[in-house]
Amino acid sequence: MDGHRRRPYQKHNRFRYLLLPAISAISGAILLLYFLLSFLAPSPDHLHHLGHHTSFHDKSIDIVDDTSKVSSVFKVPTSSKIISERDLWTTSRSEFYFGCSSASTQFPKAPAVTRPNRYLLIATSGGLNQQRTGITDAVVAARILNATLVVPKLDKKSFWKDASTFSEIFDVDWFISHLSKDVKIIRELPHKGGRKWSPYSTRVPRKCNERCYHIRVLPLFSKKRAVQLSKFDFRLANNLETDFQKLRCRVNYHALRFTDAIITMGQTLVNRMRNVGKHFVALHLRFEPDMLAFSGCYYGGGEKEIRQLSKIRKRWKTLHISDPEKERRQGRCPLTPEEVGLVLRALGYGKDTNIYVASGEVFGGNETLNPLKALFPNIYSKETLATKQELEPFTPFSSRMAALDFMVCDESDVFVTNNNGNMAKILAGRRRYFGHKPTIRPNAKTLSRLLMDRENMTWEEFSTQVQEHQVGFMGAPNEARPGRGEFHENPTSCICEKSKNKPKTISSLPRKASDNKVDETVDVFIDKIRNSYNEEEEEDEDKDGIVSNLNYFLNDTNVVDFSTGYEETELEELLSD
């Protein structure tokens, strides 16, 4: 009986001894798992930092009062400190330089060298500023060939879809008369036997120099009196004889004048910007869908962004698949509107700065622009400065709208470009020629890394590094060595230095030791930065591919209308060969 009673007790006791170790083991496992999760899970600060790395969506700018204590968290001050080292609205030593493009005594007048019955026609390509480059080079090409130039035809077939003629954008009478001493220019090809001549059409290679034109084009005039050069964009060498370079400047900076209608409306926009404040910054934002799709960059917009940009990229079936992270690290991605704003604030431009934005449709709309507006509330555009009725004559024409933006950017106290396309290069060269007005080009390769890592530093550290990295990218004299980069961006042959004796062009100035050791150190530092940067650019430009031909898409402030039937066969033309 006792044995029967003990049996259940023994079973219960044995079960209790087995249960306790099991409970302990499970509890230990849960506790261990908890510690592992706590250790591996990212902190809220890290998640916030990651958000700044990848996305411009759903973000707010942290702006703190200047009187608050500096913390390790990245905070943008409500106001910027005065930059004592430089004036925000002028460039250092700019008063010692001026534009000089007069022909030398060894450059004969056009009537003495122009051959009879030798006519050159060109067909431009691209948007307004790419065509402007082609027109400028066409005048020089006509002079090299001693030919009469027929007023250039503008591109009406590309996806910019602007049917404007030369005389509807530029003052054709001024163009012809102002260049009469350099090149004979006529409006139309003359008739022969009651019929208009049919020109022989050909294309010259890119960067064709004087000898190239003499070999490839000159013999054609013995067979045909009229020769047309098609797809005329960047078909003239960057480095030419000084007189030809100066002719380029006379065309670009003096002969190519917009029509009265464009000038009047453009000046109205400038005056209205002046009315809201003494100074203003013009920002060529270039953050449109076509630009982002073509660059292959990613901005953290998730599936929606990938889907939208991929749809546009399908238009170019031969477009290479890029590594977005690599493109970003190498500075080939446009900065976001917020990042551009942060750079400007770091350079000393306060929250009350008036900014004119030259841009088409910004990718992401207001959601993308809001962070920039938080940094700079006073943002304007031609659409906000003018009524629909005032813009009505220009709105249907992308080149005329781009011309208005060009005028405001040219007249601005400071011009900021978010890319290095045709408009940016032409404006940079023009602003150098007319007094070296500040032209800020973000040093994207260095700033991209800094911007991605900004949450790991204070605002003071960030601002200091931005100012250091921007040395050589502010539009000051002698930022680039003569002959480096594109001539339209750095027209050194047409910029002279004031001296007691006579003006000397920058390209002819001998290097001499500076009396000021600080200036000497800065000059060396600038040369080092610009030379290394230009070498990388030249390597890119020599590749017949995406980077060198990105200029077509960086061209203007208006976007592509992808709703229309764009032909894949035009890809090669879009990429400028």
Image (spheres, grey):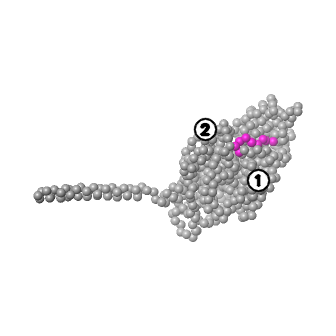
Q: Can you give x and y, in whole percent of width and height, for residue 333 in the image?
A: 60, 49
Disc 1 marks which residue? 392
User: Could you tell me which secondary element the residue under label 1 belongs to?
Assistant: loop
- Amino acid type at circle 1 is Glu
Q: Can you give x and y, in whole percent of width and height, for residue 211 in the image?
A: 74, 35
Quadrant in which the N terminus is drawn:
bottom left
Residue sitting farthest toward the front: 1
Residue at 80% over, 29% down: 223
Q: Alpha-carbon distance for marks 1 and 2?
A: 38 Å
Disc 2 marks which residue? 318
Residue at 67% over, 58% down: 515
Would residue 276 be visible to someone looking at this image?
yes
Which is nearer the eye, 566 or 185?
A: 566
Type of secondary structure dominating the magenta stretch: loop
Question: Could you say which disc has been placed on residue 567 in the image?
Answer: none
Residue at 77% over, 58% down: 268
Number of dots carrying numbers: 2
User: Could you tell me which secondary element the residue under label 2 belongs to?
Assistant: loop
- Region in magenta: 151-160
Residue 410 relative to residue 188: left or right: left
Q: Residues within 10 Å of mark 2 (few under 14, many from 20)?
A: few
Query: Is-magenta flag for residue 112?
Result: no
